[in-house]
Structures are given as structure tokens and as C-alpha cells.
């Protein structure tokens, strides 16, 4: 393991972030009051599980080449992307405190990303 973050590995991490976001959007879309039984019968749930499986394979490839101390904090970008996906797709509110938290997570991710270069 080189200990540095290459452009292909950064791209694969970003793919993992997008796959995780897609998974969470699918699961949110499938959610209902009797979540477990109802969700298991919905194709969108299985699509989310498919995203999870693809992310698992991609994440394993990332961990072969990038130190966990760099790769895992970069996955925190999923928190940021999921917040925006919730706002855009499900019309969820983002208040000032929430937006500040998202900004701080993004700043932290940027610090780790620069450290890994």
C-alpha cells in the first residue's frame, strides 16, 4: 500500500459515495409504516441492496490501495451528498444548523483529502 491517494482511487471513493447515496435514496423511497414486510416486496428495496453489493466490491478495491485512515474519512462525503439528495428528491428541509454541520463535514473531508495526496 502506497499510503497516498491516487486519482483513480479518489474516483473509486467518489463512486462509493454515489452508490451509498443511491442505496439510501432507494431505502427511503421503499420505507413505509410496516417497513420490513412492505419494503421486502418492493423492487426499489432490491435495487438499494444491489447498490450496497456494488459498493461493497468497490470499497474493498479501495481498501487494497488506500490507507483506511484516509479512505474512511473521505466516505463522510456521503453524509453531505445524502443531505442534498434528501432535500432535492424528498423536499426535506435544511436549516442553518444542519447546513453548518454539512459545511464542517465537507471541510474535514477536504483536510483529509489534502493529507492523502
Image (cartoon, helix red, strand yellow):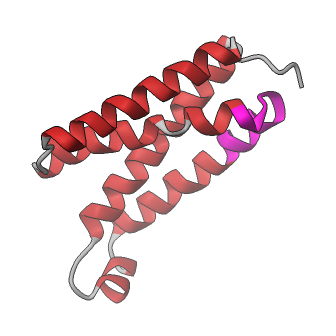
Q: Which residue is more in the foreground, 49 or 72? A: 72
- 4 shown above or below 73: above
Q: What x and y, as percent, mark residue 113?
A: 59, 19
Q: Which residue is more in the foreground, 64 or 117? A: 117
For the C terminus, the image quarter is top right
Overall secondary structure of the magenta stretch? helix
Q: What x and y, as percent, mark residue 52?
A: 54, 55
Q: What x and y, as percent, mark residue 27?
A: 35, 63
For the N terminus, the image quarter is top right
- 31 shown above or below 93: below
Left or right, 66 with reference to 12: right
Residue drawn where x is 50% and y is 20% of the image: 110
- 50 shown above or below 63: below
Residue 1 belongs to magenta span: no
Residue drawn where x is 65% and y is 50% of the image: 56
Left or right, 59 with reference to 18: right
Q: What x and y, as percent, mark residue 14?
A: 52, 29
Tell me how many marks there are.
Answer: 0
Q: Which residues are magenta?
A: 57-69
Residue 58 belongs to magenta span: yes
Q: Where is residue 48, by image quadrant?
A: bottom left
Residue drawn where x is 15% and y is 43% of the image: 94
Q: Where is residue 106, by image quadrant?
A: top left
Name the outermost residue toward the right: 1
Residue drawn where x is 34% and y is 58% of the image: 26
Amino acid at each position: 500500500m502506497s499510503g497516498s491517494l491516487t486519482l483513480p482511487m479518489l474516483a473509486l471513493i467518489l463512486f462509493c459515495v454515489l452508490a451509498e447515496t443511491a442505496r439510501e435514496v432507494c431505502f427511503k423511497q421503499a420505507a413505509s409504516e410496516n417497513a420490513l414486510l412492505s419494503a421486502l416486496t418492493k423492487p426499489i428495496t432490491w435495487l438499494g441492496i444491489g447498490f450496497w453489493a456494488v459498493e461493497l466490491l468497490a470499497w474493498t478495491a479501495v481498501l487494497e490501495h488506500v490507507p483506511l485512515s484516509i479512505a474512511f474519512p473521505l466516505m463522510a462525503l456521503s453524509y453531505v451528498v445524502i443531505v442534498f439528495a434528501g432535500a432535492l428528491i424528498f423536499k426535506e428541509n435544511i436549516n442553518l444548523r444542519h447546513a453548518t454541520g454539512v459545511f464542517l463535514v465537507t471541510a474535514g473531508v477536504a483536510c483529509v483529502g489534502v493529507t492523502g495526496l
